[in-house]
Amino acid sequence: MKQSKKYLGVFIALLLGVFVSGCATTAGKAFEMSESQVKLRSMQTRAFDTTDKQKMMQTVISTMQDLEFVIDKADLTLGSITGTKFLGNAVVTMSVTVRTRGEKQLLVRANAQFGLTSVDDPATYQDFFTSLEKAMFLTAQQVD
Amino acid sequence: MECNKNMKKISLLLKSFVFLIVCFNLVGCVSIPKGFLKIEEKSLEKRQVQMRQYETTDETKILTAVAGVLQDLSFTLDNSETKLGFVAGSKKADATNKGQIFWMALLGGANAVAQCDGAEVIKASVITKPGANGKTTVVRATFQRVVWNQMGQVNRVESINDLDVYQKFYDSLSKAIFLEAQKI
C-alpha cells in the first residue's frame, strides 16, 4: 500500500511536470502555425471593391480608433497600420495591411494578438470587418 | 472496514484529480475573450470627447501644429505618416503618489511600498482627416498609459478617457493654429 502511494506521488509529480512545461515556447515554436495557413488567411482577409488605398487606410484607422486602439505605426507605401488596445490588464495588438488586388479591388488583412497568443477565432475577425464595412459605407455616403 | 478503505482510496483519487485540474487551469493558456473587436455603444461618446473639427483644409498645417503641441507637452515623437495624417508620440513621467506610498508603508511596510506606482509612459496618437463637407479637417487624439511599480513591473495599463486631458490638449492645439476648435 505504502509503495503504491509512493508511485502515485511520482506519477502526479510527472504529470505536473508535463502540464507546467505544456505552454513553454521555444524559438522554433514561434514559427509554428496553429491553424492551416489557408484557413487563417481566409478568416483574416477581405476584399473591397475600391482602389482608393489612402481612403481605405484612413477608414481602417478610424475603425480601429472606434475600437479603442491607439495607432502606433502607419505607412501608406507599405499599406500597414499597427495599433494597441488595453483590455483590462491584457494588451491586444493588431496590424492591418491593405494592398491592391487586380485592378479593381483592395485586399485588407488583419491579424490580432491577445497577450502572448495570436487570435485565431473567425468570429472576432468577422466583428472587425463588419465594423469596417459599416465605416466604408459611411465614408462613401459622406455622413461622418 | 473494507468499505472504509475504499472510501479513503476514492477520496484520495478525487482529491488528486481536483488538484490536477486546478494546476491545469493555473498553467493553461489564458483564454481569449470573444467580441473584443465589436464596436461598443459607448464608442460614439468617446468619439465626441476625442474629436474636434477645424475650419481649414490644410491638413499639413494641423499636423505640424499637433507635433508642436506634443513637443510643448514634452512628448517625443515616435512615428508619423503625413499622407495618412498620423502623428504618434510618447512621454515618460513620474507616477509616484506620496499619499499612496504613505498608506502602503503604514499598512504593509517596505514590500507594499514596492508595489506602489513608480513611473509611467503616456502614449499619444493623433489622426487628421478631411471632414465630410470638404471644408474642414477632423482631428482625433487618443491617449494610453502604462504604469510601472517601484520594482519596475507593470502595475496597470489603461486608456485615458478623462475629458479634461482632451480639452487641455485641444486648447493648446487651437492656440497653436489660431483657430477655434469646434465640437462635433
Image: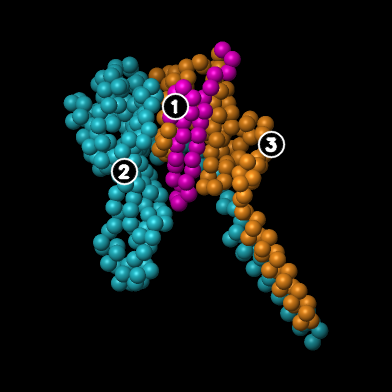
Chain colours: A orange, B cyan
Q: Callout 3: helix, strand or loop?
A: loop
Kind of residue at badge 2:
Lys
Q: Is residue A109 above or below residue B5?
A: above
Q: Callout 2: helix, strand or loop?
A: strand
Residue A96 part of the magenta-drawn span: yes
Kindly report the distance in space between the C-alpha atoms of the residues bearing marks 2 and 3.
Answer: 41 Å
Question: To which residue does mark 1 refer?
Answer: A75
Kind of residue at badge 1:
Asp
Q: Residue at x 57, y 41 (%)?
A: A119
Kindly report the distance in space between the C-alpha atoms of the residues bearing marks 3 and 1.
Answer: 29 Å
Q: Residue at x 35, y 70 (%)?
A: B110
Q: Is residue A121 above or below residue B148?
A: above
Range shown magenta: A74-103
Kindly report the distance in space between the C-alpha atoms of the residues bearing marks 1 and 2.
Answer: 22 Å
Is residue A117 among the parts visible in the rendering? Answer: yes
Disc assigned to residue B64: none
In the rendered picture of this protein, how many numbered marks are placed on residues? 3
Q: Position of residue B139 (x, y in %)?
A: 32, 29
Residue lying at the far top in this picture: please name it: A103
